[in-house]
């Protein structure tokens, strides 16, 4: 069973990882990220944390807030955790550059209404 009182903490974990990604997304080019496995897997880990936090949200919370595409985030987490050998750098890069900035205001809004 999912932890009913942990949704707020999970959102806070997401926001922390989002802020790390946003603070670092313009420090490197895609080529630099692909050339340095430490940098690459640093990005992977932050996206993975977001996905893991989504995975741990209660089903009730996710159903009450369909404005966030929880399923896509969870699927990305599964690829990063279980398919680590198949990670496509371009897809990760697009996620960090495009999706993460869009996700931040959604998570901030949810934190305002989450007890």
Image (spheres, rainbow, N blue to C red):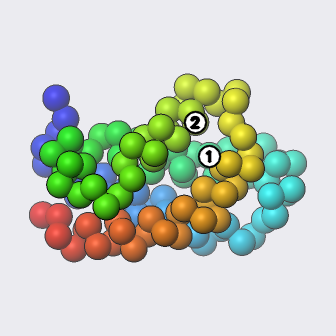
Among the 4 quarters of the image, the one containing residue 55: top left
Q: Secondary structure at mark 1?
A: helix
Which quadrant of the figure contains the C terminus? bottom left
| 70 lies above or below 78 | below
Question: How many residues crowd mark 1 within 10 Å: few (<14), some (14–19), many (20+)?
Answer: many
**Count of number-bearing discs:** 2
| 112 lies above or below 46 | below
Question: As rendered, which of 53 and 110 lies closer to the eye?
Answer: 110
Question: How many residues crowd mark 2 within 10 Å: few (<14), some (14–19), many (20+)?
Answer: many
For residue 44, which numbered disc appears in the image? 1
For residue 58, which numbered disc appears in the image? none
Question: As rendered, which of 92 and 18 lies closer to the eye?
Answer: 92
**Residue receiving disc 2:** 80
Q: Residue at x 46, y 45 (%)?
A: 72
Q: Secondary structure at mark 2?
A: helix
Q: Position of residue 28 (x, y in %)?
A: 78, 65
Q: Residue at x 45, y 47 (%)?
A: 73
Q: CA distance from mark 2 to mark 1?
A: 7 Å
Is residue 55 shown left or right of residue 98? Answer: left
Q: Do we see residue 20 in this rendering? A: no
Which quadrant of the figure contains the N terminus? top left
Among the 4 quarters of the image, the one containing residue 22: bottom right
Q: Residue at x 30, y 40 (%)?
A: 56
Q: Do we see residue 113 in this rendering? A: yes
| 109 lies above or below 73 | below
Q: Position of residue 48 (x, y in %)?
A: 51, 44
Determine contact: label 2, label 1, CB under 8 Å: yes
Q: Residue at x 52, y 41 (%)?
A: 76
Q: Position of residue 27 (x, y in %)?
A: 75, 70
Compare marks 2 and 1 and give the one earlier in the sequence. 1
Q: Position of residue 112 (x, y in %)?
A: 22, 73
Is residue 6 shown left or right of residue 89? Answer: left
């Amino acid at each position: 069973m999912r932890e009913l009182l942990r949704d707020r903490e999970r959102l806070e974990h997401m926001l922390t990882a989002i802020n790390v990604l946003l603070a670092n997304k313009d420090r490197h080019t895609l080529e630099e990220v692909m050339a340095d496995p430490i940098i690459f897997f640093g990005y992977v880990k932050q996206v993975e944390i977001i996905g893991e936090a989504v995975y741990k949200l209660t089903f009730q919370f996710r159903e009450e807030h369909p404005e966030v595409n929880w399923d896509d985030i969870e699927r990305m987490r599964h690829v990063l955790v279980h398919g680590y050998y198949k990670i496509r750098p371009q897809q990760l890069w697009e996620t960090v550059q495009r999706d993460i900035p869009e996700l931040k205001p959604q998570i901030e809004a949810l934190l305002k209404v989450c007890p």
